[in-house]
Structures are given as C-alpha cells and as structure tokens.
Image: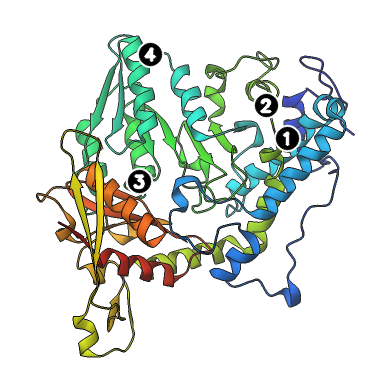
C-alpha cells in the first residue's frame, strides 16, 4: 500500500508525482470506488444498434430535434452524468474525508486510465500519466501554454486563418502585450488536399519562429490537418508546436509521444461525451518545468502534475466520471464506433438513396423565402411560405448530390465532421458572409428544428455536419429537404 505522504498543503496523499510514478508500474493498486459503476453488459451480449436506439438508451437528446451539431458542445452520456451526480452526493456526505484524503488517489487513477485510452491502439503505450494533466477545457489549456511562453519583442508566433476564434483573440492579446509579431497565413478554399497546407507552411514559416499553433481539426472548416508533416517542418525550423485537438479524442488515434507535438490538448466532453468541464493537456517532459498554471495554488513547485491537480476547491465530478465514459467506449469497441461514423459520414455527405414517386410529384415543391431588412437597424428576418403541397422527390441524393455542390476538402480529410457547400442560389450578391450564414442557420432551426451550423468560407456557404453514434441517415435526408426549400428573396 502506498504511504499517504504529504507533499503540499494539509492534504493527505499529496505526493502526486510519486503516486503517478507508481501508476506506471505493473504493481499499481487503484483506490476502491465508493459505489458500483454501470456495467455495460447487454442482454445476450447484443449491443444496441447505433442511431435512434443508441440515443434512447445512452443519451438525453430530445427526439424532436434533428441534432447534427455534436461538434458544438458535445452531448453527455446519461450514464456518465448519473455517475457524476453520485460523486457529488458522496462528496457532500463527508467533504473533508474526500478532499483531504481520497481525491488525489482517485485523480491519479483516472489520469492513468485516460493516458492508456489516448494510446488505445498502440502495442506499447507511449503516453505516460506523468505527461498528461486533467483540465476543465481546451481553452484553459491553450491559455496555460501560450501565456507560459517566453516571448519578447522581435519574436514571431505563427497561426493559420482557420485557428479557433477564441485562440486568435488570446494570441493577439499576448503578442500585443509583449511586442511580438503574430503571423497569420490564409488557406484558400476549397482545399484540394493536404499538400496545399504543407506547401503553405513551407513557404511561409520563418526559421526561428518561437511558437506555431494549429488545430488538429479546425472548428469552422472541420478538415483534418496533416500534423506529422506540419510538426516535422516546424521542428526543422526551430519552432515549438501547440496543437488544439478539441475535436479528436475518441475519434482519432492520437499516439501523442510519437506524434511529436510539444503541447497537445483535447476535450473529453466533446466526442468522448463526458460530463462538461473535462479535458486534458499533454506536455513533453522536457518542457513541463517551463509551463506555469493559470492559477497558483498549493501544488506549485512540487512538479508538473501537482501544479495542475489542485487549483482551488471545485467540482471534480466530471473528471471522476471518466471511468464510466471510458468503460462505455471500450465496451462498444472503438473500431466499431469509428467504422459507423465513417460509413454514415460517407453516406450523408455524398451518397444517394432512392424512393419512388410520380413525375408529377417531382414538379411540386414547397418554397421557403427569407427576406432580409437592414435599414440601418437590427437585422430583421421575415419568413413567409407558399405551398404547392410537399411530396417526396424521386431522387434523394444526399447533400452533395442533392444540392449539386461539393465539399470544402477531399472526403479523405474529414472525420466525424464535414463541410458541405450549400446551393449557389442561396448566396446574396454572389458572395457569402457571416450574416447570411446566421440567417440560414437560424431558419433551419426555427422552421425545421434542425440543429446544424452554417459557415461562410471562401465566399461560399457551407453546412458543417457532425456524425456520432446516435445519428442516422434519415436526419441528413431531412437536412437535404429543408435546404432545398430555402430561397433568399
């Protein structure tokens, strides 16, 4: 049994670095849990089908909404939410016992499990629990890394135009404050392949640039960046690399140590479906001493993990519920999950399905008009309808085929999200802007109860569709129908 030594504060078992070191060994003994966790054992070993059955059994999403925007804030597994609430009740039954004696060993245990899950498909796990810390969200992790950089006047920080908006603001604030040049390079859309990004970086990244920031999957554009090549180019030019991987955990194999990024962060509450307020930050061992947490508390000066494990009293239930989240995904099998998402994405974005109806029915459409009134004041949207009776069209080619458009990038560059171009006739004055995108997104929600984001990229309008295990093809057919009914007057 590991001694409950104190390294900082009044906490028992605050010897965090020692506990994490023990967690790496083969004789690690995890702490006992105060209650039984859900067992994902199904009758006759039969896992519920993906789609509607999975939504009903494991998610809280309302049936009336066509929810194809998982990429925004995720959706929590109801099993994990139940467990988080059990932790909250347990904590309040004897708060001092929990925070003073039990919390840290439990956090070490779940950190060990998360590190193993990150390298789920590696024969030998190369992600050590000593290199990964739990943190509330990716935004906080990005702040920790960027604000810890030693930057001075004359230095340069690099980013692409698809960098997440909040991170752009952070980089601008830090660079302005320290007199550092912020270099932003633009990608042209549509993308024709990963080499377009690699070439842009080779042509524009200057040797000696202090830090380069990339999204593994940019939120707005949703393509997968060619990270191995990007990281290699940056390191050849003496540039450290920070990766915002908010949309990757559970969807992609990360293999963080072999990937080579200096810093990598991802959310657990997005595609992994943990309770909100759960993410991780990975830092190369040789850089950990150079990083400083945003909040200085009792663990400061006792090592990388100790400095992040306690940043003041807060609700740790989202972290502790990770056991149930990881159990769930392991019970389904990650290969099976990813296979379903890949297949459904392919069908939703670019396949065709057929139904029978008469030639007369194809002639008949319901039209939806959106009129925009600016008049120097707040945007007003007037919606009005004309009916000629809605019947099923004969050919139900989904999205790309139905709308006769294209993707923002080759389909091989998309994972669980994809950007599909909307029909050209929805453009006002031939060029898309944020205002037009917002009007269409709000119209799809208010009139069809479809939750999907609309993006203005490269002067075109795109829907960014998400695919998860609770989605099914019928939802994207509904989107295809709704968009065909939209007309801007």
User: Between residues 268 and 212, which one lies in front from this camera angle?
Assistant: 268
Question: Residue 384, image x and y in percent?
Answer: 24, 60
Residue ID at (42%, 13%): 150
Label 3: which residue? 225
Mark seen at residue 107: 1
* Secondary structure found at label 2: helix
User: Between residues 459 and 366, which one lies in front from this camera angle?
Assistant: 366
Mark seen at residue 64: none
Q: Nearer the viewer, mark 1 or mark 3?
A: 1
Q: Can residue 190 be seen here? A: no
Which image quadrant: the C terminus?
Answer: bottom left
Label 2: which residue? 309
Contact (CB < 8 A) between labels 4 and 2?
Answer: no
Above or below, comparing residue 159 to residue 320 in the picture: above
Q: Is residue 106 shown left or right of residue 338? A: right
**CA distance for labels 3 and 2:** 31 Å
Q: Earlier in the sequence, mark 4 or mark 2?
A: 4
Question: Residue 370, image x and y in percent?
Answer: 22, 55
Label 4: which residue? 151
Which image quadrant: the N terminus?
Answer: top right
Residue ID at (79%, 52%): 37
Q: Is residue 380 shown left or right of residue 219? A: left
Question: Residue 287, image x and y in percent?
Answer: 52, 23
Residue located farthest toward the right when viewing the structure as drawn: 1
């Amino acid at each position: 049994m590991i001694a409950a030594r104190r390294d900082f504060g009044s906490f028992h078992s605050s010897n965090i670095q020692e506990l994490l070191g023990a967690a790496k060994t083969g004789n690690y003994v995890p702490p006992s849990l105060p209650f039984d966790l859900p067992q994902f054992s199904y009758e006759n070993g039969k896992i519920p089908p993906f789609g509607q059955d999975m939504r009903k059994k494991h998610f809280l999403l309302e049936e009336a909404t066509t929810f194809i925007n998982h990429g925004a804030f995720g959706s929590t597994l109801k099993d994990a939410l139940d467990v988080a609430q059990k932790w909250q009740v347990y904590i309040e039954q004897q708060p001092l016992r929990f925070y003073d004696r039990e919390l840290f060993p439990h956090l070490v245990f779940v950190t060990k499990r998360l590190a193993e899950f990150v390298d789920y498909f590696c024969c030998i796990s190369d992600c050590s629990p000593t290199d990964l810390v739990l943190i509330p969200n990716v935004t906080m992790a990005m702040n920790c890394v960027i604000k810890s950089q030693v930057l001075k006047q004359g230095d340069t920080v690099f980013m692409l135009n698809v960098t997440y908006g909040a991170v752009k603001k952070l980089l601008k604030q830090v660079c302005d404050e320290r007199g550092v040049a912020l270099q932003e390079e633009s990608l042209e859309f549509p993308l024709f392949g990963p080499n377009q990004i690699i070439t842009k970086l080779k042509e524009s990244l200057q040797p000696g640039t202090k830090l380069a920031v990339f999204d593994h999957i940019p939120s707005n554009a949703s393509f997968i960046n060619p990270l191995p090549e990007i990281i290699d180019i940056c390191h050849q030019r003496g540039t450290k690399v920070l990766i915002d991987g908010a949309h990757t955990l559970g969807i992609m194999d990360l293999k963080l140590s072999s990937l080579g990024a200096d810093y990598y962060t991802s959310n657990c509450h997005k595609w992994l479906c943990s309770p909100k307020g759960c993410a991780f930050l990975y830092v190369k061992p040789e850089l950990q001493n150079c990083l400083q947490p945003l909040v200085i508390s009792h663990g400061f000066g006792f090592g990388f993990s100790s400095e992040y494990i306690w940043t003041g009293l807060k609700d740790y239930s989202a972290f502790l519920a990770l056991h149930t989240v990881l159990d769930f995904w392991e019970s389904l099998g990650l290969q099976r999950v990813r296979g379903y998402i890949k297949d459904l994405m392919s069908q939703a974005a670019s396949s065709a399905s057929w139904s029978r109806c008469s030639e007369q029915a194809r002639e008949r459409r319901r039209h939806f008009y959106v009129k925009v009134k600016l008049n120097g004041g707040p945007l007003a949207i007037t919606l009005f309808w004309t009916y000629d009776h809605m019947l099923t069209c004969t050919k139900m080619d989904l999205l790309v085929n139905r709308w006769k458009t294209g993707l923002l990038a080759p389909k091989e560059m998309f994972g669980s999200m994809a950007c599909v171009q909307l029909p050209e006739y929805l453009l006002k004055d031939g060029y898309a802007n944020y205002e037009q995108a917002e009007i269409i997104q709000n119209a799809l929600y208010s009139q069809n109860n479809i939750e999907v984001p609309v993006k203005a990229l490269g002067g075109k309008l795109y829907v960014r569709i998400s695919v998860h295990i609770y989605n099914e093809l019928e939802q994207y057919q509904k989107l295809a129908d709704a968009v065909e009914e939209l007309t801007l007057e």
